[in-house]
Structures are given as structure tokens and as C-alpha cells.
Amino acid sequence: MTSIKKLCAPVGESPAPGLEWRISEGLIPYEEAVAEMEARVDRIARGEAPELVWLLEHPPLYTAGTSARDEDLLEPTRFPVHRTGRGGQFTYHGPGQRVAYVMLDLHRRGPDLRVFVRNLEEWLIRSLARFNVEGERRDGRVGIWVDRGRRGGRAGQEDKIAAIGVRVRRWVTFHGISLNVEPDLTHFAGIVPCGIQGGIGGHGVTSLVDLGLPVTMADMDVALRAAWDEVFEEADPVDR
């Protein structure tokens, strides 16, 4: 049985505008999360509910974005596979990975999807910096990366620590980001994550614990909440 607790109540007396934070305890089935997101997006678009940042974990599963290639699903029977309308290719979700579904009204904040994705990247980078991890963008590669050579690893090896996949409906965003805190990294072997091949001088997958940092999910949530205010609340939202 899952439970949800609020980190921040909606602002104001009316249902919207405002921003609500939630943390779900336990593992949330993917279909349940998608149904909740779609219903919330419709309510936000109608002005009946505040924006929402929803932090959760899923049971082990693979998701396929709109650019997913069948050949990148290496072990199709290992975990359930969900076809989804978000952008991107194949990715893995599972215990120990913090998923953040971000439902924002871009009519109010500014209808620019590229700026929104750039802000998601910056959010992740600043959150990781709180643990002295230098997360970086890479041209042609979605997500946030760690240079393992700088951390005593093999020179030229860059590992992905966070993924981004978003969708927009009526200028309200949903889906969002996933950040590896302490997932089972062997579970990524069933796919080519985001179409990126590994190998010598190539690219792999890492986590905070894999980097030698004893970070808990609660620690990560505090960092995400603090970094959010720096990135998304720096400027006043654009009026509707």
C-alpha cells in the first residue's frame, strides 16, 4: 500500500495557482502514476489544481519514449516494458532511483519548452553539487553526466547519473526526471539506456552510492527541494 505526504501545501486559498510537492512512500506502479499525471495535467490546464512536483520510486521496469528503437531493448522479458508518450528512448526505473514527475503550467511560467528542459538540467546539476558531484551536460546526449576520470576512474569514461524525458499537453508539462541514488545498476543491462552504447572510452550508468557517497533518498529530496527554489523560483512567473 502506498502513501503520499505533502512537502509544501498549495499557495493561496483557491485550488490554483500554486505549487504542491508530494513524496510517495513505497513503489508506485507505472500505470497508476501515468493515470494520476494525466488527470492532474488536465486539472492544471483548466485552472482547477496547482502545479505539482511528485517524487516517487517505481518497481523495476523499462519505459520506451517516442524515439525508442526496438533493437535497444536487449532483454525484452526481464522487466515489464511500458510504451509512453514522453520524449526520448529506452530507460530504466526501479527502487533506489528518485523519479520526479514535474507538472508545470508553461502558460504562466513562459511557453518555451527548451528553457524548461534547460531548467530541469540545471535543477539536477545544482542538486548533485550539494554532494560535491559535478553533473554536466553533453551535446547530443540527453541527461546529466559524470566524468569518471575526474573521480579517480578510467580516463574518458563518462557515466550517466540522471535522465530527462518530458511531455507537454496544453502547455502543461508532465513526466520529468530520474536520478540514480542507489538503484541496482545491473538492471540497466537489459536496454541500451537512451540509445547510448558503452564500452571502452564509452558511456555507462552510475549512481551516487556507486560514486562512493552514502546518500539516502531523504537526503536527495532535501537537495532537490532546495535547488528547485534556486532554479525555478528565481523569477516571478509570467502572468496568464
Image (cartoon, helix red, strand yellow):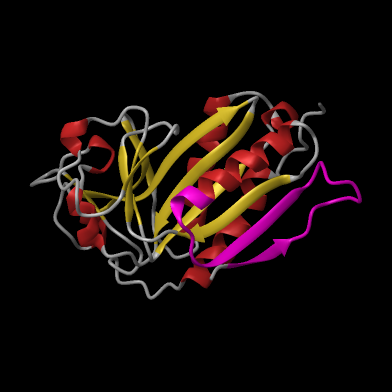
Q: Quadrant of the C terminus?
A: top right
Taking the image as shown, residue 134 lies to the left or right of residue 77, namely right
In the depicted structure, whether residue 223 falls above or below residue 167: below
In the depicted structure, whether residue 179 falls above or below residue 143: below
In the depicted structure, whether residue 72 falls above or below residue 228: above
Q: Residue 109 sits in which quadrant?
A: top right
Taking the image as shown, residue 60 lies to the left or right of residue 226, namely left
Q: Residue at 16%, 40% (x, y): give it.
A: 197
Taking the image as shown, residue 96 lies to the left or right of residue 43, namely left
Nearer-the-camera pick, 91 or 154: 91
Q: Which residues are magenta?
A: 3-32
Magenta-colored stretch includes residue 31: yes
- Residue lying at the far left in this picture: please name it: 200
Residue 120: x %, y % from top left: 52, 41
Magenta-colored stretch includes residue 196: no
Q: Residue at 15%, 44% (x, y): give it.
A: 74
Q: Residue at 44%, 32% (x, y): give it.
A: 85
Q: Residue 71 sits in which quadrant?
A: top left
Q: Residue 45 sits in which quadrant?
A: top right
Residue 133: x %, y % from top left: 39, 59
In the depicted structure, whether residue 118 falls above or below residue 123: above
